[in-house]
Amino acid sequence: MAKKNTSSPAAANARDTAVAYLHSMLMQRRFEEKSAEAYAIGKIGGFCHLYIGQEAVSTGTMAALRPDDYVITAYRDHGLALARGMTANEIMAELFGRATGCSGGKGGSMHLFERKLNFLGGHGIVGGHIPIATGVAFAISYRGGDQVCVCFFGEAAVNIGAFHEALNMASLWNLPVVFIIENNRYGMGTAISRSTAQQDVVKRAASYAMIGTSVDGQDVFAVRKEMDEAIERARKEQRPTLVEVRTTRFMGHSMSDAASGTYRSKEELDQSMQRDPIVLLKTKMLSDGMITEDDYKKMDDEAKAAAQAAWDFADASPEPSPEELFTHVLSDESTVGAANNAELAGAGR
Amino acid sequence: MTVMTYRDALNHALREELTRDESVFLMGEEVAEYNGAYKVSRGLLDEFGPKRIVDTPITELGFAGVGVGAAMAGLRPIIEFMTWNFALLALDQVVNAAAKMLYMSNGQYKMPMVFRGPNGAALQLSAQHSQAWESWLAHIPGLKVVAPGTPADAKGLLKAAIRDDNPVVVLEGEMLYNTKGEVDENPDIVIPLGKAELKREGQHCSIITSGKMVLVALQAADQLAKQGVNVDVVDLRTIRPMDVEAIATSVAKTNRAVVVEEGWEICGIGAQVVDFIQRECFDDLDAPVVRVHQADVPMPYAKNLEKLAKPDAAKTVAAVKRVMYLED
C-alpha cells in the first residue's frame, strides 16, 4: 500500500477503513460477475438477481452494524450476504445447489441464511420480509436488548401493503429497526414513474411519524454516515428510520433480462454507470494517496481469485443427499437444529 | 376435573403457558384492553401486562409477520386472528414465511409460533365471515393444524401448540366457545399433536371428523343409537399430521365410514381422509365412503338457506344409513 498520508493514526485509520470498503465491494463485484458466468452455462438455476452497481449500499451499511445486530433482505441478496461476512464459498455453493451451501442447497439464490451472523434471509416475496423485520425489532425490544434490525428492499416494495403495515407498527411501538429503500428506480421492468404516485419515496416516512432521509447510494462514505445516524437512533432512542438510498443496478432485474434496451435506455444506463461506486471509491483513494494503481490491481486480482475459488469449491461440492429432501420440514423430523428433537419426535408424528 | 367452557379452557391454556414461559406472548386485534373479541383472552392484560398481551392495529398481514420475525429472534408468539376469515390477508406470512423458514434455511430458523382464532360458520354471518379453512392450511408442508372440538381438547391442544417448535394453526369454533365440558386443571396436561381420539365407540360404522363437527357427529350418534345403529366417532383433533392409524383401526372394525367436515367438498379434508381409507382399508370396506360437508356455495345469509348449506346431524344420520344400506 502507498505510504503517503499515513503519518497520523487518524489517517492510517481512514485508510484502513477505505481499504476495507474497497475490498468488500470488489469481492461482491467479482463474485457477481462469476455468478453471471455460472448462470450462463447452467451451473446456477432458477432466478438469479445480481447486485452489481449497488455495492456501496451493502458495504456502507454493514460497516455500521454490530455483530449481534440483525439483517434481513429480499432476493437480491448475494452482495448483502458477502458484506455481512458470509463466505463466497458457502454462497456460491448455495447458488450451485450443493450440500455445502449456506442453506444446504435448499434455498438457492433468493434464500441465503446464516444464523451465526444474524443474517435472516433472503426472501422471495416483494415486501413480505418487511413485517418480519418489525417482528425482529419487537423481539429485541421485548427482551430489553440494544440490538438493531436493518431491513433492505427495493423502491417498488413501498407500494405493497406489507410495507405500510410494517412501518406503522414499528413507529407506533418505538422499535429499533432501520428500513432501507434501495432505490434503483426500476421494479423489475417498471420505472418508478410508472408505478409510484409519489416518486419521492422517502416522503412515505411522514405517514408513520418516522424520520426519513435520503442518501447517495453510490458513495460508500455517505451511506455509512447516514446509517450510523439511523442505527444510533434505533439503538439509543428506539426509533425507526426510513432511509432511501439512491442507487443503480448495472444489470437487468435478473439474469433473464438485458441491462438496457427494453424498459431502460442505453443512454440512461451509461450515464448512471459513470457513477460506479467502486470507481468512485478507487478514484478518491488514489487522489488521497491511500492506494496506488498497483495496490488496486492486487486487491482486484485477489477478489477475482476468491470468486474463482468459490466456483471451484461449489463445483467440487456434493449435491444434497436424497434424504435431505425430507429434513427440516418440521423441527421434530429434523436431524439438526432443535435441541429437543427427541422429546418432540414422539409427540409430533 | 372441572366443568368449564371451551372459551375458558383456551383462556386457562394461555394463562398457564404465559406463566410457564416468559418468551410466550399473545398478539392480535382487541386481545388486550377489549379482553378479546370473543373474550378468550379475558383478564390476561391485567395479569401479564401490555408487553406480553399486545393489541395491534387492524393489520393481519403485518402482525402475522411480526410474529414470524419475533419467532426468528427467539420468542414464542401466539398470533390471534379475530377470525380465520380475516387471516386470509395474512396467508403470505403463514404460508410463505412461517411454514417454509425452517426448510429454506436448512434448519437454522425454527418457527415456534401459534396462529389461532375462530374458524368456520357461526350464525347468519353470511359469505365472508363463515368459512372453514382447514383444507387450505392443512395443504401446506411445514405447518401443523389442530381443530379441537371439546373444552378438554381445546386446552390440551393449545398448550401443546404453544410448546411446539413448529408453526401450529389452531382452528377454534365461534359456536364452540360457550360449550361446556370437563377439563383437567393440572397445568402439566397437554394433548399430543397428531393423535386422534375415539369419542364414542360402536361397531356399525365409523364417523371421522374434527373441530366443530365433533358435536354434530355425537348428536348424530345419539340419534342413530336410538335406531339400533352404533357408531365409532373418531375425532381427528389434529388435521395435520393426521392420525391415519386411528382411522384405519376404526374402519377395519366397522367396515363402513362417513367423513364429516365443515368446509366445502372439493379438495376438502374429507377427500384426504377418503384417500387414506382407500389406501389403508380397501379390503375392509363394505360400502363406498360417504362425505358430509357444506354445500358447494358461498354461505347464504337467510336462516333457511344457511341451514340447508351447513353439514348437520340429520345429514350425518342420513349418510350413515346410506353406507349401511338402510332405508331412511
Image (spheres, grey):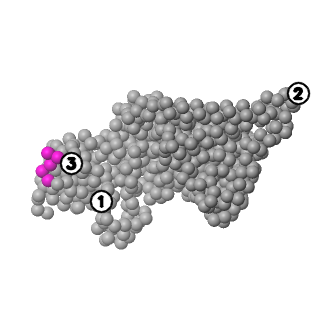
The lab-note entry on whether marks 3 and 1 share a chain reads: yes
Q: Check the residue under mark 1 and report the chain it is in.
A: B
Q: Which residues are magenta?
A: B282-287
Q: Read off the chain for label 2.
A: A
Say which element carries label 3: helix
Frontmost residue, A45 versus A345: A45
The disc labelled 2 sits on which kind of residue?
Ser
Residue at image coords 35%, 32% = A346
Q: Amino acid at mark 1?
A: Glu
Residue marked by disc 1: B265
Instruction: Name the residue that disc number 2 marks.
Output: A7
Residue type indicated by callout 3: Gln
Q: Which quadrant holds the C terminus of chain A?
A: top left
Residue beneath label 3, please? B278
Q: Look at 84% across and 39% down and name the residue there.
A: A287
The foreground one among A194 and B23 is A194
Residue B283 sits inside the magenta stretch: yes
Residue B313: x and y in percent read 24, 59
- Same chain for mark 3 and mark 2? The answer is no
